[in-house]
Image: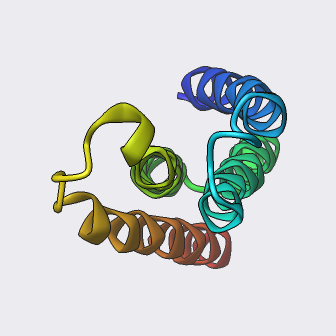
Amino acid sequence: MQRTFLTIAIIAAALAVVLGAFGAHSLRERLTSEQLLVFETGVRYQFYHAFALIIMVLLGDKISVSGMNYTGWFFSAGILLFSGSLYLLSMRNLLGIENWKFLGPVTPLGGLCFIAGWISLLVSILKK
């Protein structure tokens, strides 16, 4: 499972670099400053949690296997839901998805996944 989460972390970090560059160079002229800030928040949190996944893997001998699984999947889901929804919300005018009302509630669900991942990491470390 460590290999799976390390792979997810590396892909998430690489995509964060790509998306950050895309935002800085291609979206600067196409989004409002508020939309660009939302996009950048998605990139930032994606980076934070890619690094968190790497740290989790490095702490593997100090974390129970089941705890690592929960933590890894919570962080991964958080990246997808939180950052992914922010990318879509910030670019919805460009993508023609202004009517996708379900995106607003997805962001806090991603945030809850991040919180659950951090709590899971703490519990796993304390248990071991």
Residue located 65% across and 79% down the image:
126
Q: Position of residue 111 (x, y in %)?
A: 47, 71
Residue located 68% across and 45% down the image:
53
Q: Position of residue 95 (x, y in %)?
A: 37, 33
Residue 58 vertical position relative to residue 95 in the rendered view, above or below = below
Residue 10 vertical position relative to residue 75 in the rendered view, above or below = above
Q: Position of residue 57 (x, y in %)?
A: 72, 40
Question: Which one is nearer the viewer's eye here, 2 or 37?
Answer: 37
User: Which quarter of the image is occupied by the C terminus?
Assistant: bottom right
Question: Which one is nearer the viewer's eye here, 74 or 16?
Answer: 16
In the rendered image, which quarter is residue 93 located in? top left
Q: Is 108 left or right of 13, judged from the image as shown?
A: left
Q: Position of residue 9 (x, y in %)?
A: 68, 33
In the rendered image, which quarter is residue 116 located in? bottom left
Residue located 52% across and 28% down the image:
1
Question: Which one is nearer the viewer's eye here, 68 or 38?
Answer: 38
